[in-house]
Amino acid sequence: MRTVTVIGASLAGLYAAMELRSQGYDGRLVMVGEETHRPYDRPPLSKEFLRGAVTAERLSLAEADEIGELDADWLLGTRAEGLDPPAGSVLLEGGRRLPTDGVVLATGAVPRTLPGEPLHGVHTLRTLDDAAALREELSRGQVRVVVIGAGFIGAEVASSCATLGHNVTVVEAAPQPLLPQLGDEMARFCADLHTDHGVSLQTGCGVKALHGDVHGRVDWVELTDGRHLPADVVVTGIGVSPATGWLRGSGVPLDDGVVCDGGGVVASLPGIVAVGDVARCAGHRSEHWSSAMEQPAVAVRNLLAGSTVETHTALPYFWSDQYGVRLQLAGHREQADTLRMVEGSPEDRSFLAVYERDGATTAVLAANRPRPFTRLRRELARSGGLATV
């Protein structure tokens, strides 16, 4: 390959570029990124950055010398609008065609939004610019914040806003926050974290509409049960969708992401691989930081080999910081799995627990127990995802 183009200049795209060089690729490397920023770390956006504890400069994922060593052509602030695999080219905004021999799809995901006319004061949180705009609003004095969605992003935003002294309400359509991910008992634990810190948690109801004032600024939130919540700022954290719209009509198979095998290779298109949030590998799409960091090594190896010579088998892992509690989960939890406390207790806001199925451990969950969690996570990984703990 004389030219490889990485579409998406965030974590997965950066690690793909680094892997290309470390695995011996010495041809032309092009990085296409819709944002104007160099690759930066997203997890702090809802936490330290939103609270003003870190600057944008501190979020950089690579030092200047590391960027220089990539010897890449950076096309930042440039949107990819199409892909033509038979012609071996990427269509960029403005009609420019970029010839390429190999492509790494790393466009990530975009936040879902509520229907209706856009209103000032309504935010999503995905990019550095999103976080900067929300932080600016929160710095103007105490405000009434309504967070829609009690998933990981919603919970972290609510935690940050409460820490900053704002009046926070969280609206969650499910009976408990994070119920599908953690199960009933641990979902109640997460609900208690909100209420412990003065956050009003409204579960089992959705949002019917957002209403604005005469100036086009959000004023109140109408819930599906008829209640009205006053709001100066609204943050929607209702999930994301893979950023694949620009690939429609390209021949790249799409189904809740770019369909690829366990090694990230797109079916019948060996010169194209997908990594990170946009990749649906072997029927599964992961939206976690660790997957975006780990997948590129395997995908790049397969890209350079011209076929799938390795698959990605790392154990799923994520963490979330809420109200001074670090939650960590590793493994494959299913709905029927049972929970067992290994040490500590939810009441103490510090514990280590395992999920079990047929006498074997399928996943490990911890709150403020990083060392024992790491030990059990390693045991689970060594056993291939099922262990006896």
Image (spheres, rainbow, N blue to C red):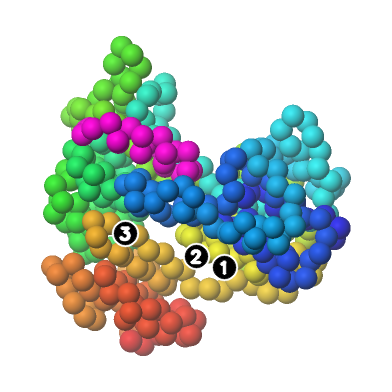
What mark, if any, has residue 321 been given in the picture?
Answer: 3
Q: Amino acid at mark 1?
A: Glu
Q: Amino acid at mark 2?
A: Ser
Q: State the separation of the CA atoms marked 2 and 1.
A: 6 Å
Circle 1: element type:
helix
131, 236: nearer the viewer: 131
Q: State the separation of the CA atoms marked 1 and 3.
A: 21 Å
Circle 2: element type:
helix
Is 81 magenta? The answer is no
Are the two marked residues, 2 and 1, in contact with CB atoms closer than 8 angstroms?
yes
133, 387: nearer the viewer: 133
Q: Name the residue: 33% across, 32% down.
A: 137
Say if residue 213 shows up in the picture.
Answer: yes
Are the two marked residues, 1 and 3, in contact with CB atoms closer than 8 angstroms?
no
In the depicted structure, whether residue 124 falls above or below residue 210: below
Residue 118 quadrant: top left
Q: State the separation of the CA atoms marked 2 and 3.
A: 15 Å
Mark 2 is surrounded, within 10 Å at the Cα level, by few (under 14), some (14 to 19) or many (20 or more) other residues, namely some
What mark, if any, has residue 305 been given in the picture?
Answer: none
The percent coordinates of residue 261 (x first, y second) are 65, 64
Residue 325 quadrant: bottom left
Q: Name the residue: 19% across, 42% down.
A: 165
What mark, if any, has residue 290 been given in the picture?
Answer: 2
Q: Earlier in the sequence, mark 1 or mark 3?
A: 1
Is 125 magenta? The answer is yes
Q: Quadrant of the N terminus?
A: bottom right
- Horizontally, residue 316 falls left or right of residue 26, namely left
Q: Which residues are magenta?
A: 124-144
Residue beneath disc 1? 294
Q: Name the residue: 32% across, 75% down.
A: 370
